[in-house]
């Protein structure tokens, strides 16, 4: 679909790629090995408006639509070859900030969005818990009890991207247990609220340049004005409003990742010689590259379709779920097959394919597993 994109948007996409290649890519290998977060990189991302791309202009952002934001995340992933920082950006700008953009009050938007747009403050989402994943609402144990003009929040959240570095978190908690998933409310929690603490940084298989931890709430007092939307409407309104953005924009990064893996594999296959000729001339290798390219283009079309529908205001739970399950599974498959092209070198840390292989594993787990995506597709077909 790139032939349908206007020149200005394509130039914008290239500018994001160039930025990521210049400022993020050179240190990606080293930061991945040590699991290091670099605040200077984040600061530069804020300076070019990347951290506030989808936030409206009146609150300090760029006001980009879902499609343009998806292109930016695709380009950033391709240019940086850094799944962790790409993930941190998505957790901040999409699942952290978009609930405020889409459902926040005017007071909340004016108070929080300008600093999030500039990157001065970092956002995250607190939904998953130690004992709840796919059934995030039904199995939720965190509670928020109303006392006067405040809520008292208790519980914990697990696997929270940006947990150790975040300043503002959108947190879901049960406010009426008798209503099950319909008794969940959403709150804005600041890192300095008394009783809020961050667990130890989790040592992950992939996405190691992003910071992930548990969030712990012990009698945290939250002003009523920090509740997003009406009480008990969190999962029905805030969750649904944000999920299609998450399953489109965040997943768009997989396009950039696959593009990198394929391009690197093609270059290597042309240079690597066995039995007196370049291995790209071998049918087995050519077949892997051709199949990977077909998966890349298919994923791109599905993600672009979901983003365009979103911008047209067309509800797209099926389309966004199809895009997510196909693109993330395709990324896993491409990572494996392009690793086969590299042979033993795919097992060596200095080769980006090794990092991409580990990073790709999260895609089918986070933001709704492939199994949950298929249940959504089936239920709405």
Image (cartoon, grey):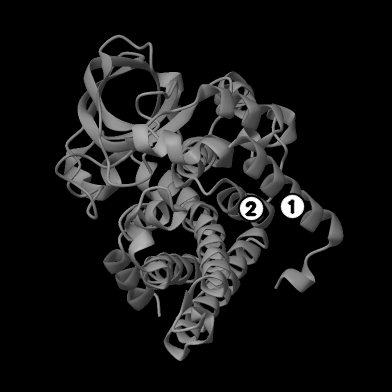
Question: In the rendering, at what x and y percent does residue 171 appear?
Answer: 35, 32
Q: Residue furthest left?
A: 131
Q: Which mark is residue 183?
A: none
The residue beneath circle 1 is 14
Name the residue located 71 percent from the left edge and 32 percent from the top edge: 48
Question: In the rendering, at what x and y percent does residue 155 appear?
Answer: 19, 28
Q: Is residue 354 left or right of residue 44?
A: left
Q: Secondary structure at mark 2?
A: helix
The Cα–Cα distance between marks 1 and 2, rounded to whole angstroms, is 7 Å
Q: Is residue 230 visible?
A: no
Q: Is residue 351 above or below residue 28?
A: below
Q: Is residue 323 left or right of residue 377?
A: right
Question: In the rendering, at what x and y percent does residue 281 appear?
Answer: 53, 86
Name the residue located 40 percent from the left edge and 29 percent from the top edge: 36
Q: Is residue 97 above or below residue 320?
A: above
Q: Is residue 225 above or below residue 325?
A: above
Q: Is residue 213 visible?
A: yes
The residue beneath circle 2 is 75
Q: Quadrant of residue 363?
A: bottom left
Quarter of the image with the C terminus in it: bottom left
């Amino acid at each position: 679909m790139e032939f349908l994109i206007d020149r200005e948007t394509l130039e914008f996409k290239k500018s994001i790629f160039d930025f990521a290649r210049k400022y993020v890519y050179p240190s990606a290998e080293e930061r991945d090995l040590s699991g290091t977060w670099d605040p200077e990189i984040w600061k530069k991302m804020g300076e070019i408006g990347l951290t506030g791309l989808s936030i409206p202009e009146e609150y300090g952002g760029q006001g980009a639509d879902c499609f343009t934001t998806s292109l930016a995340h695709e380009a950033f992933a391709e240019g940086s070859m850094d799944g962790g920082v790409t993930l941190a950006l998505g957790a901040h700008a999409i699942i952290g900030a978009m609930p405020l953009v889409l459902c926040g009050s005017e007071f909340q938007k004016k108070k929080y969005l300008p600093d999030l747009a500039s990157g001065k403050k970092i956002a995250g989402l607190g939904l998953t818990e130690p004992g709840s994943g796919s059934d995030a609402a039904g199995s939720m144990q965190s509670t928020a009890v109303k006392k006067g003009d405040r809520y008292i929040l208790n519980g914990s959240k697990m696997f929270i991207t940006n947990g150790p570095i975040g300043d503002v978190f959108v947190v879901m908690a049960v406010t009426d247990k008798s209503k099950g998933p319909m008794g969940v409310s959403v709150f804005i929690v600041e890192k300095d609220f008394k009783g809020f603490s961050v667990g130890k940084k989790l040592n992950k298989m992939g996405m190691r340049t992003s910071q992930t931890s548990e969030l712990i709430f012990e009698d945290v007092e939250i002003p009523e004005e920090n509740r997003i939307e009406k009480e008990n409407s969190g999962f029905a309104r805030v969750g649904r409003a944000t999920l299609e953005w998450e399953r489109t924009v965040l997943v768009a990064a997989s396009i950039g990742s696959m593009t990198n893996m394929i391009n690197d594999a093609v270059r290597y296959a042309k240079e690597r010689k066995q039995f007196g000729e370049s291995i790209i001339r071998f049918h087995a290798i050519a077949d892997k590259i051709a199949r990977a390219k077909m998966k890349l283009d298919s994923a791109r079309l599905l993600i672009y379709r979901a983003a365009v529908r979103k911008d047209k205001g067309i509800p797209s739970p099926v389309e966004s779920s199809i895009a997510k399950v196909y693109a993330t599974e395709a990324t896993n498959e491409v990572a494996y097959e392009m690793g086969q092209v590299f042979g033993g070198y795919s097992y060596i840390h200095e080769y980006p394919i090794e990092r991409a292989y580990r990073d790709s594993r999260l895609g089918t787990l986070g933001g709704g597993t492939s199994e949950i995506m298929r249940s959504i597709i089936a239920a709405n077909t």
